[in-house]
Image (cartoon, helix red, strand yellow):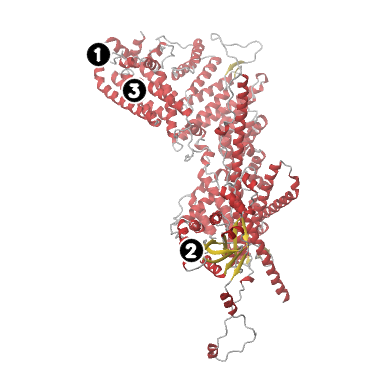
Amino acid sequence: MSRFFRSGESSSEDSSSEEEELYSEEEKDEEQQEDSDEDQSEEDDEEEEDAESSEEEKRGASKFLKDVDSSDSEDSDEEERGQVKSAKDKRYGELSQTIKAIENGSKIGDWNTVATEFDKLNRQVSKIKDSGSTPKIYIECISDLEAKVLEASEKQKVTPKKMNAQAARGFNTLKQRLKKNNKDYQDLITSYREDKLGFMESDEEEEPLPVKPRKIRFDTFEPAQPAADDDEGFETVDGKGRVVQFTPESIFKHLRAIMESRGKKNTDPFGQIKVMEKLNSVAVTPYQRIRVILTMVSARFDLSAGVSSAMPLEHWKAAEQELSTLLTVLEESKEYIVIENAEDWEDDDKPPTLGPNDKYIKIPGSIVSYVERLDDELTRSLQHIDPHTSEYIDRLQDEGSLYNIVFRGLLYYETLRKETSLEIPQDSLNRIVMRRLEHVYFKPAQVVNILEGNCWKRVPDSVDSLITPRESITEASDLISTLCNYLFNNSEGIIKARAMLCRNYFLALHDEYYLARDMMLMSHLQEQIAQFDVATQILYNRTLVQVGLCAFRKGLVYEAQNTLQEICGSGRQKELLAQGVQIQRYNQVTPEQERLERQRQLPFHMHINLELLECVYLTCSMLLEIPLLAQTGSSPDIKKRVISKTYRRMLEYHERQIFTGPPENTRDHVMQASKALAAGEWKKAIQFIHAIKIWDLMPQTDDIKAMLSKQIQEEGLRTYLFTYAPFYDTLAVETLGAMFELEPRKVSAVISKMISHEELAAALDQVTSTVIFRKGVELSRLQGLSLTLADKASSLIETNERTLEQRTQGSSNAFERQGGRGRGGGQRGGQRGGRGGARTGQRQAGGTTFTGGALGNAVRG
Amino acid sequence: MADVKKSVPIAGIQVESLVVMKIVKHCSSTFPSAATGCLVGMDQNGVLEVTNCFPFPSVEAGTDSHQNDAANTAASAPRAKSNLTYQNEMIRQLKEVNVDANNVGWYTSATMGNFVNMNFIENQYMYQKDNDKAITLVHDVSRSSQGALSLRAFQLTPLFMSTYKEGKFSTESLRSNKLTHKEIIKELPINLHSSHLITSFLHGLSGPPDVSEVDMPVSVEEIERNAPPVPLNPSIDGLELSIDPFLEKTCDLLLDSIESHYTELNNHQYYQRQLAREQTKISTWQTKRKSENAQRAAAKQPLLPEDEWQRLFKLPQEPSRLEGMLNATQVDQYSKQVDNFTASISAKMFAVRGTLLYE
């Protein structure tokens, strides 16, 4: 019966012959297959479902034709088979070839090849299957392969010998795919195993016409096929041809049906959504609307079940719209509330009514989860879009409306919180506040202000927020601090830490270096950051980098270098800041890890410019390292002190080059500037540094450049003094000033600092304003060596004593005298170390690790 | 003669001045790479007389091989096969010209006393195992350049010889043999002996002029006719006051020794950790086996053997302590050297101060 409806409907659209239909479908299949092959196995499920659903849609049109074909005219079918046959034979040939390759591969254990061949095989088979039955040899092959894989994996467990990584990966993929694939052919495989010969011998020609297992599906319940909106005069029918009517009364019935089929296989989510859209249009009471929207939004989110694929754009937009409507509905009809801990209303026929004691009608659902999900989906889709296209910009504009939703969700939760009887967990509120914070913390104040302004415009004047009152919050910084303070007071653990980091990030972004640094130190996050999840660690790294950049903008070179050291010195900036996946050279990462890594990536608009970061880091390193290199000269014991290994390595590499062309990239610029600075040509160094284009990305480029010039002049002076002090007896401050174009006051300040840090053996004569160098204060080589020897010897003694203590189990009191001597040695060493430290002064004092040390020292210093 | 040889251990060494001159020449010509050669002579009543020597031909290292290799080949030259035949041949030929032709040991050059190493031990062992009176003469080129000639004679102690023969240098055997680093080598006193001819020649050398005032020669002819005797140049190297180079060098060497000591230490600690790990494994295995046996005994089943662990587990090999001991000996040498040096140098310093104060 129904087929007549169907065919009537589709005949207008599908004028093409069945043959064409078939081929186009095959091609589509093939494409799908290839797609899914490339993606990870988890996605496969979903992809296949997609493929199936799209196939279904098609089949919705074509199946009837086919059925008619098969039932009506036997001979025409025969004819067709005859036609197809030559192509079919060819395919069989290909198939047997592939099977051969698989067998060969599995014999020599080349699983990688087997996996690829297996994919090829499946593609070929799907082609054949569409035109006929599943080929026998295919069943034989997969069954054998399964046995072989099983055997191989057994063997793997026993023998300690590993496969090589590539083969192992191929093997695992193969295993998974095989498992999934063979499920479909389980019956055939079992029958094959039971009677191998019989199965193979049964004549292929006598195979019944293609029996499509999928056909069965249509007998089960299926929601209505999507009906085009414009087909006036047609009535919507469900899979069985019943006329489906959407009335306000039947809404709940439909919803229930949809809810029940949710998560099951072979449902058509798009169809369901269409149904719900219809339902939404007929819903009248707020209760109905709320219920429909809730279900619909969840269904939309279900569309992107995969981990790495984003949900389709139009659905995201629709979900966003619907959430907005939902919030409006909830605001309008205040007796209905959506909370997590509500009971499900079982009765479909009559809507719940207000009980005598109830103030609200509770509907189960979680606004905060929806908001979070919506946010995540946007992030995910942003991750997938090429950031240099206009598409990205378009997509980014949705963030405004998303922020609006977050904001309104927050307002909604605030109103719910007012009602203590509802027991809204603090956690939900925290979560939503956190989301809001995460949307603003990395943005400049002006942008945040605009964002906020738009939000407040959308809500009625009567509404006000408890956490962020409309009146008192006018500036972005106020907003951030209010949100953060709220979270500090009301949350625990990760959210608190994240709030702290967001705040510091914002402060650092807005040049509040000291505030950000102090907060960072007071939070004591450095010690515990390793215990947090990866996302928080990334945020920590981002904040750290931002604080470093802020210090640089302030001209605090030492602090900036120290702060950036940990991130930039590692050479894994990309990974640490989640701004790209590092190319793994030595250690293989599993696809699993790589996928996780990709998921963590930040969308482009949140990135910190890595080139700028590197530039800042290298420039800071240069300003610190060049004087240090000049200072240490050739003396052996201090030579080991290295501020930045990365920088040193680059410098060495640069010096090894025979020809150095004009600088091309940032690194070249800094390296050539370093060389010039080391040679005392500070003007050239300034030129090189100023030629770096990336400074333009910094706000107030000119200030930065001026600051850099000043720094280079000073460091140039220091370098000069370190290098040439041995050749002078006295040196006029005036001369130095003229040489480096610095004021005499500044020169004497620099010199005094060096003298007081015992970096320079000199005295400053203020009457004649000259520097008088002292001679012979350097340690002679013998002295240096003797000190080293003394150190080594005392440490040897200590080692011996420790061994003795271990042996005598702490009863080494008899050796008290020796112990005392040993300790004395230790103290001597300690004193020396202390002196060494003092000699090189405060600069060394912090050590090079950030973990608490660097900033801590800056505070003390 | 033979039984006399056996009975009397050598107490002193008498070295001909010719030998000394030859050694000094050979060693300083190859400096800084090591030089080795063979000593010939005979022993008489506990005194070993070294009457002649000849250098081993240094194997042409070639330009392609590394510097270290060259040093190594030179140091291990006495053991090289070609050199052994060369040595025998040489001795045979010396016999033909009627020179003392008994191989009594070998000599080597050294820098700042850094001669105690495996090469030294192996060479000396090779000589001493055949002839227990074989000795090594060590000529320290660097120290000799500071004034006094440094030529020392060494032998391996019998205790060490026997231990080395066994080849076991585990803690256990060292303890049972009471072998410490002090008992690896012993130094023998050296006596320089010059032939009468040389002595008389030395006496014939003119000393410094007797009178302080010498009449000015009247003319060139007079000088030519009556050339004043060239006085023997007095050695003033002994008054050298440069302390730094010597001590620096020693410091460097000491630091090296400490480094290698640490390496040895680490090796040994690694061994100990490994040992402890194995032992815990064994003990757990043993307890497990014991409890199993107890159960089996209760169930009246035959007991499982309890000494299987010897087959199942393999205890790690203890690293040889020889390197460490040699290192200690070497450090000992260095310290003695510094001691000697400072003793003489402080005397000189006092002398200098005395002169300065006097003026």
Which residue is at the front of the view, A571 or A314? A571
Whole-number angstrom distance, CA of label 1 to CA of label 2 = 113 Å
Tag 3 subunit: A
Q: Is residue A641 visible?
A: no
Which residue is at the front of the view, A729 or B358? B358
Q: Residue at x 43, y 27 (%)?
A: A152
Amino acid type at circle 2 is Ile
Q: Residues within 10 Å of mark 2 (few under 14, many from 20)?
A: many
Q: Where's residue A336, x and y in %?
A: 59, 17
The image quadrant of residue A754 is: bottom right
Q: Which mark is residue A125?
A: 3
Q: Residue at x 70, y 43 (%)?
A: A805
Amino acid type at circle 1 is Ser
With respect to residue A164, does A417 lie above or below? above
Q: Residues within 10 Å of mark 1 (few under 14, many from 20)?
A: few
Residue marked by disc 1 = A76
Tag 2 subunit: B
Which residue is at the front of the view, A191 or B277? B277
Q: Where's residue A564, x and y in %?
A: 57, 45
Residue marked by disc 2 = B91
Tag 1 subunit: A
The image quadrant of residue B170 is: top right
